[in-house]
Amino acid sequence: MTLTQVVAYAYAVTTENEQLDRTDVMGEMDLDAALRAIAEPRRREILTLIAATELPAGKIAEHFEVTRSAVSQHLHVLKDAGMITERRDGTRRLYRASEAALGELRMFLEELWHDSVDRFAREVVEDPKEAP
Amino acid sequence: MTLTQVVAYAYAVTTENEQLDRTDVMGEMDLDAALRAIAEPRRREILTLIAATELPAGKIAEHFEVTRSAVSQHLHVLKDAGMITERRDGTRRLYRASEAALGELRMFLEELWHDSVDRFAREVVEDPKEAP
DNA sequence: AACTTTCGTTAGCCGTCGCTTACTGTGGCG
DNA sequence: CGCCACAGTAAGCGACGGCTAACGAAAGTT
């Protein structure tokens, strides 16, 4: 069973409404903003932190040596870019990486890489000796 | 035949020395610099331009409405990040996207996405109703 | 109601970024 | 050699980004 199949199954077993909620809550990913967001090392660390686990802002901030304010601003940037989702629980705000957004970013690079590989393979076929 | 198999074949038909040259010439990709490089829209356009085709600096600059100088600086940033390779032919400098670097970037996001998907799949298995 | 916890927001500082304008460098050609 | 086409480099400017410090806001707790 491939990873993609697992995802397909996961979506399949959720109800239609739940799926609507899911795509609804997630503020559509902005590719430009997303790439700018992950260009920052600390934001990348935050993203890896909440890729597999949901965490409150405080717990996230503990992992860094900058102010909680700074982390809060990073979270704001990530949220605006659609890279993370926010869920409230009392005074806490729980964050997690948006699987859909990560998938879109992944696809963007996949396509770019694909173009590059195509060219490379073409050159090899035309003249193996010229292959870089 | 999958894409990965094509790549494997392409590498296989090149000689060992050629492969050494290939990895030698390419200034090891810097993930941090690479992500900062593709955060800029114009640099991303440049990258897509030379993903499947090798182009001289002048031809690249023609596609934009900024100065050739600006494009030259963008190319410098991309090269420093290891995202592109440079080959000289007379006074011309031919650029192309580094397939290896694009692959590494792709892998980085692949892993991040993978972590996120794992979590999502786990939640569904544990309690489908709780799936976001 | 007063206080605490958890967290976001604002103002302002300083460093970095992308751009233009000028200048410099280099290879080919008469 | 002198010149031209093709490029990178340097200086300097306006804009933007990330940080801290101080403040604001909301949900529990006593």
Image: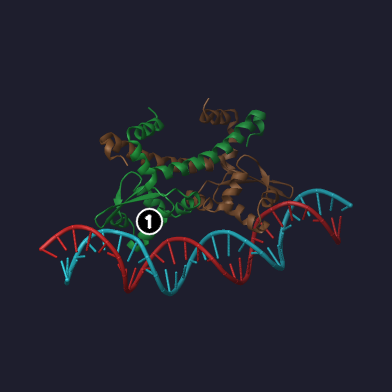
Chain colours: A brown, B green, C red, D cyan
How many numbered callouts? Answer: 1
* Residue visible at 38% across and 34% down in the picture: B7
Residue B55, given in percent of the width and then of the height, sits at 29, 50
Which image quadrant is residue B72 in? bottom left
* Residue visible at 68% across and 56% down in the picture: A68
**Looking at numbered disc 1 in the image, what kind of residue is underneath it?**
Leu
Residue B64 left/right relative to A63 = left
Which quadrant of the figure contains the C terminus of chain B? top right
Which quadrant of the figure contains the N terminus of chain B? top left
Which image quadrant is residue B76 in? bottom left
**Towards the viewer: C4 or B99:** B99
Residue A115, given in percent of the width and then of the height, sits at 36, 41
**Towards the viewer: C15 or C4:** C15
**Towards the viewer: D18 or B32:** B32
**Towards the viewer: A50 or C2:** A50
* Residue visible at 55% across and 31% down in the picture: A7
Circle 1 residue: B75
**Disc 1 residue crowd, few under 14, some 14–19, many 20+, Cα 10 Å:** many
Badge 1: chain ID:
B
* Residue visible at 29% across and 38% down in the picture: A123
